[in-house]
Image (spheres, coloured by chain):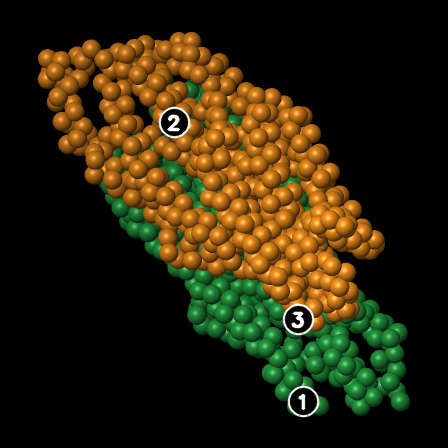
Chain colours: A green, B orange
Amino acid sequence: MVKYLLLNFFRSKVHPIGLALLLVSGLISLEIGSRFLERVDRVSEKTAIHQQESIARNVSYFNKEMGNLMYYLRFGLENETPRLAGLSIGQRDVYPSIQSLTVRNLEEQRYATDLVNPLFQLLGNMDFSFVLIYLFPLVIIAFGFNLISEEKEGGTWSLIRSQAHSPLLFLRLKLGIRLVSVLFVLLLLLITGKFYLAIPFDVPFLIFGSVSVLYVLFWFGLTWLVVSFQLSSSQNAQVLLSLWVVLNLLLPAGINMLQRWFFPVPEAMSTVIQNREGYHSQWDKPKEPTLQKFYARYPEYQSFLHPKEADFSWLWYFAMQQAGDDEAAVEVEALKNKLDSRVQLAKSLSWWIPSVHTQLSLNSLSLTDLGNYLHYLEALEEFHEKLKAYFFPRIFSNAPVLDEDWSKFTLEKFRDQPQVNWIQLMAPFGLSFLLIWVWAGYNFKKSGIQSIQKH
Amino acid sequence: MNKKGKIALLAGQVWNNTVSQSSAKMLILATNFLLIAFLLVGFFNQQKHQEQIHGFGKEVRDQWENSPDKHPHRMAHYGYLVFREKFPLSFFDYGMDSYLGNVIFLEAHKQNTVNFSEANLSNGLLRFGELSAGMILQVLIPLLIFFWGYDLISRDREQGTLKILFAQGVSGAQLLWGRILGLFYVSLSLIILPFLLAFGLLFLYQETDLLGQSMIHFLFLYLTYLVYFLVLCMVAVWISSRSQSSKSSLISLIGLWLSFTLIVPKIAQVIGQSVYPSLSKIEFDTAVEAELIRQGDSHNPNDPHYAALKDSLLKANGVDSTYKLPFNYSGYVMREGERLSTQTFLTHQKNLIDQFKNQQQILSLASWIDPFLAVKQLSMGFAGTDYEMYLSFQDQAEAYRYQLAQTMNELQIELISNKVKNSSDPAARLSSDYWEDFPDFHPSFLSEKEVFQNNLAGIAVLLLWLGLMGFVVSYSSLRIRVF
């Protein structure tokens, strides 16, 4: 029987076309991923060179006062992009992967965005995760929607019922061949991607592959469930496409809307106002309170003093800058918490929506999600503190600029680690599989297909 | 029965058959409900945004006006924060809005990016698309039209009723147009109520000065969608009349829907990105900086450009030191520096934006074969959420920044003595009255005429599709297969 089913599979036009469509769009998506990674590498390289050049140039201009020099110098921290991100670009085209910071106030600097065509952001990247989440289900639907109905409409169903040892086994084998062919293309793409994008063969990659396989299985399961109702081909096609629309367009967009509705972030704008005011208003205030606040924040600098009656000192200047960050601190914390709430809301709702779960899981494995960005924002804070801890004593004591080995300030990297929680990654699929298995079994039993098996 | 009567009768038949199905009734109700819900959510979000940014805008203005007496260059660094307003109709179609920044810090010497777009604050889900009326109208309703229209001719053929219709004297043209019209009626049932509501919402908008323009834009939006739906109805009925079976008709239409909404836009985007690569921020900044250094670095005391400027100033005024100049020398240098750096920045920015526009041009070209793309562009254009509207804001913000920096430089040149030690010197302070004199930022939107001109190509595409499908339907009505 398998032989005939295979013959039947390869004779139809739909199957080679569908598989070729997946293969070609998959390969294009790998090329897009590779270009994305190239761009990231290029940016990283250029920033590293630019940083060295710009430090050298500024040192040659401003070598008398450390404070004056440090007004200008920028030091970059790169949010390292794992190779896996080539498969799932996620939010990485919205967030810049490198920020270059001065030791002045952090808030003014860390939200700068990259230059990207907004129309392309609107349309979204055609990366591998897009092909997987959008295109694979469509081909699966095309392969399976008339699993039974084509036999019925072609007049062969009664033959199968009377001749086949078990019609259910026949259907399972028929769908099984389709499943194997689609999984074959998926694995081919993943292996090609692994070598083409030079992705290390590690745990995140393995889970990435497993999630992809489970997502494909989910769609085969859903198709199996829909055909178990034994409607006509046209009805099946309509139902399955509607499910695709609901799962891949309406529900994800709905969650996004809920996030916005429940966790609005006016803080994004008010931090900017508070930060600016917090710093600039200090210019017109008596210097002593500003300095006292600075000493309270960093007791280690208490030994450095503002020269009495002086109009200006770098100590006072950087104390004012610090005031800007301190003023915005509460709002910034609120902003980060709101963003985290958005992440958590989506995570808990995604348990019930495999498409959303898949996208979020792939992004978080590839470190291209909002969670990673929040980690990076924190890493930037630490980086900024580290810079201040190193340079503030040198600025306040006006250490000789030319004694410093400036070449050691190269572009630094922040390496985030994906959080791997097998249960959380796999369980939502288990949930839907269980539902599908029970429901479809019930349908087949009711229609009497299964009962023939017993005779 | 006259010709028109027959068409109306056939159209009425489609209407009755469709709405008598309980599934169709449900879908009509659900679509109306979704559209109305998203319009309201969009409207409230937009109102909240406007309220917020007006509050913030007022706060920024108050702080600016109430700044104490100080050196004007301190004010140039204090700078200004401006917020992006939303066009009244943006609740209808979010377009690019969520990917565009909302707040920009304007200061001397430096062009900052417009930050905090909604996409910045979202996790990856935004990429699935956004629920707005625009999305329902552009993506879901076409699918419904295809679902309701795929068997309008083919079913009659399969059931043998087509023969009977023709025997009763119905012509091919009457049959096709009747069915198209009927399907179009059904599609109208999805949008009439929501469109009326959206129109009513325009009157609730706080700032009434844009009401006239919004109404004109709204009319264009309405017409755009009517033509789009009519074209889709023609496509559906035509394909149904050409197909072997209802099933193959449905498969073709689904294929077409997927090509329109998913495949053609993606291909166009990939081509655009590969043919016209654009610079990253660091490459852009490095290029601007390199050119500025070549022109002359105002920070470098030994720079030839500024040394020459100094010499010519000293000569012209017959003095031997910048301290003796009758105006503030460092203000003069900063004005020159601001002028040069802004010029350079704008040249580079123009190149970048041209590159973005080249990329978008590929999509405009693709819209000739994909009416969905044309409607997407038109809808964003008239809702005021497209790139052109954003660029107009960005340009005005940059012009305001330049005006602010140069006004402060002028004040310094005229009023600050060359002898003050630094900006903290009490003699270097100007009265806060000067700050009040500097006007607030009041950006304007593109006018209806400009918006119309930007969208001429889209309108042409849509009309072409209308004409083309009209021709195709009329032509093929002469040869409808009965079996």
Gap between marks 2 and 3 measured at Cα: 62 Å
N-term-proximal mark, 2 vs 3? 3
Residue for badge 3: B244
Q: Nearer the viewer, mark 2 or mark 3?
A: 3
Same chain for mark 3 and mark 1? The answer is no
Q: Which residue appears at 46% of the width and 44% of the height?
A: B457
Q: Which residue appears at 75% of the width and 67% of the height?
A: B163
Q: Nearer the viewer, mark 3 or mark 1?
A: 3
Residue for badge 2: B399
Q: Which residue appears at 49% of the width and 42% of the height?
A: A381
Would residue A396 be found to the left or right of residue A281 on screen? left
Q: What amino acid is at disc 3?
A: Gln
Q: Position of residue A231 (x, y in %)?
A: 79, 69
Q: What amino acid is at disc 2?
A: Ala
Q: Label 1: chain?
A: A
Of residues A58 and A300, the one nearer the viewer is: A58
Q: Position of residue A68 (x, y in %)?
A: 31, 31
Q: Which residue appears at 52% of the width and 39% of the height?
A: B381
